[in-house]
Image (cartoon, helix red, strand yellow):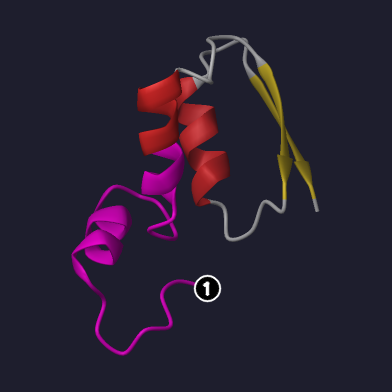
Amino acid sequence: MGNTYEKPDFWSKKAFSEGYPARSVYKLQEIDQKFRILKKNSSVLDLGSAPGSWTTYLLRNLGEEGKVVPAI
């Protein structure tokens, strides 16, 4: 899928270089850093899980016992 913008901006390029499909991942990252909403080994229901940046972030940060359930 990827970015559909003609000229990818800084955040899009950063996301792609870090293995995320979209720059929206930085919204979740900012929320998590500010409010500490994600706990290690938690289970998370990912509503609207496309294009997958948030799912990827969750999988990288929940730990080995953490689970992500995509609701597609």
The answer to whether 44 is drawn above or below residue 23 in the figure is above
Describe the element under mark 1 as helix, strand or loop: loop
The residue carrying mark 1 is 1
* Left or right, residue 60 beside residue 8: right
At 47% across and 36% down in the image, what residue appears?
A: 57
- Residue type at mark 1 is Met
* Left or right, residue 53 beside residue 55: left
Residue lying furthest right in this view?
A: 71
At 26% across and 76% down in the image, what residue appears?
A: 8
Residue lying furthest front in this view?
A: 35
At 53% across and 30% down in the image, what residue appears?
A: 59
Q: Is residue 61 magenta?
A: no
Please give the count of numbered marks on the rendered protein.
1
Q: Is residue 25 magenta?
A: yes
- Res 24 → quadrant: bottom left
- The segment highlighted magenta reads 1-29
Horizontal and vertical percent position of residue 67 = 68, 22
Horizontal and vertical percent position of residue 23 = 38, 58
- Res 13 → quadrant: bottom left
The answer to whether 4 is drawn above or below residue 18 in the figure is below
The answer to whether 3 is drawn above or below residue 41 in the figure is below
Residue lying furthest left in this view?
A: 10
Horizontal and vertical percent position of residue 68 = 68, 30
* Left or right, residue 17 beside residue 50: left
Closer-to-camera residue (16/26)? 26
At 58% across and 60% down in the image, what residue appears?
A: 51
Q: Residues within 10 Å of mark 1 (few under 14, many from 20)?
A: few
* Left or right, residue 8 beside residue 72: left
Residue lying furthest bottom in this view?
A: 6
Horizontal and vertical percent position of residue 69 = 75, 34
